[in-house]
Amino acid sequence: GAVVSQHPSWVICKSGTSVKIECRSLDFQATTMFWYRQFPKQSLMLMATSNEGSKATYEQGVEKDKFLINHASLTLSTLTVTSAHPEDSSFYICSARVGTSGSSYEQYFGPGTRLTVT
Amino acid sequence: AQKVTQAQTEISVVEKEDVTLDCVYETRDTTYYLFWYKQPPSGELVFLIRRNSFDEQNEISGRYSWNFQKSTSSFNFTITASQVVDSAVYFCALSEHYGGSQGNLIFGKGTKLSVKP
């Protein structure tokens, strides 16, 4: 159980285009989903937190107009990188969490999406 | 402020050696969770362990063991008799519940472990 999928697993796009990445919880309902970004040989940095049906909360320094997050249902969150540039090339990882407190702070990670902007 | 420090950037060992990966954390909360994840070259994060702040018992799972010491704010990870398949980047992470935090994970910078045959 507790499987999170991401689609696509990798994508190459041209500078200036937009890319949508999907994150799905396959066998559970996720009240909260997180989006992380990982540059090569670096750690994971939280970009934003999204709750189903409400606006995402972005971390300081993350442009909300560039990284659009939609958490339309309890099993799907999407991250759209708008007008992508080469510096947006990175590994994007989502995680999904069920529950809101105590022992339910378990996060399940997706396999990641490698974005390359040429 | 919450912070996770993994001072070892890279470690290289020979197969069958024991290796300990260090993790030191900072948090202002009394209730928090500590994690270790493994990230092989494929990139997918593999969950290894989760420990809450009230449980200081050390844990052993096969060749893996964890030493949690609140007095030194450390949560170290030891691999006994390392194998080539253990080669990966290992991340220590902290999740706290403070002032409405939704429990997002704060990751250390990771330790790259290379196990040579």
Image (cartoon, rainbow, N blue to C red):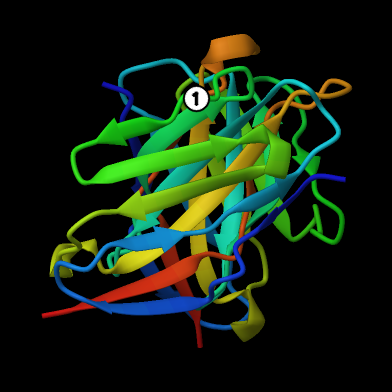
Give the residue pinned by disc 1.
Answer: A106
- Residue B59's place in the image compared with A29, above or below, is below
Could you tell me residue A85's position as x and y percent? 64, 80
Q: Secondary structure at mark 1?
A: loop
Question: Which quadrant is home to the N terminus of chain B?
Answer: top right
Could you tell me residue B17's position as x and y percent? 22, 68
Q: Chain of mark 1?
A: A
Left-right relation of A32 to B78: right
Badge 1: few (under 14), some or many (20 or more) residues near its Cα, within 10 Å? many
Q: Nearer the viewer, residue A44 or A110?
A: A44
- Residue B100's place in the image compared with A117, above or below, is above
Q: Nearer the viewer, residue B22 or A93?
A: B22
Is residue B113 shown to the viewer in this render? yes
| Residue occupying the point 80% across, 45% down | B2
Question: Which quadrant is home to the C terminus of chain B?
Answer: bottom left
Q: Nearer the viewer, residue A44 or A28?
A: A44
| Residue occupying the point 15% across, 72% down | B15
| Residue occupying the point 71% across, 36% down | B71
Q: Nearer the viewer, residue B89 or B56?
A: B56
Which amino acid is tagged 1? Glu
Quarter holding residue B86: bottom left
Quarter holding residue B7: bottom right
- Residue A41's place in the image compared with B62, above or below, is below
Could you tell me residue B81's position as x and y percent? 17, 59
Outermost residue, left side: B117
Label tally:
1
Outermost residue, front side: B71
Is residue B104 shown to the viewer in this render? no
| Residue occupying the point 49% across, 25% down | A106
Left-right relation of B101 to B89: right
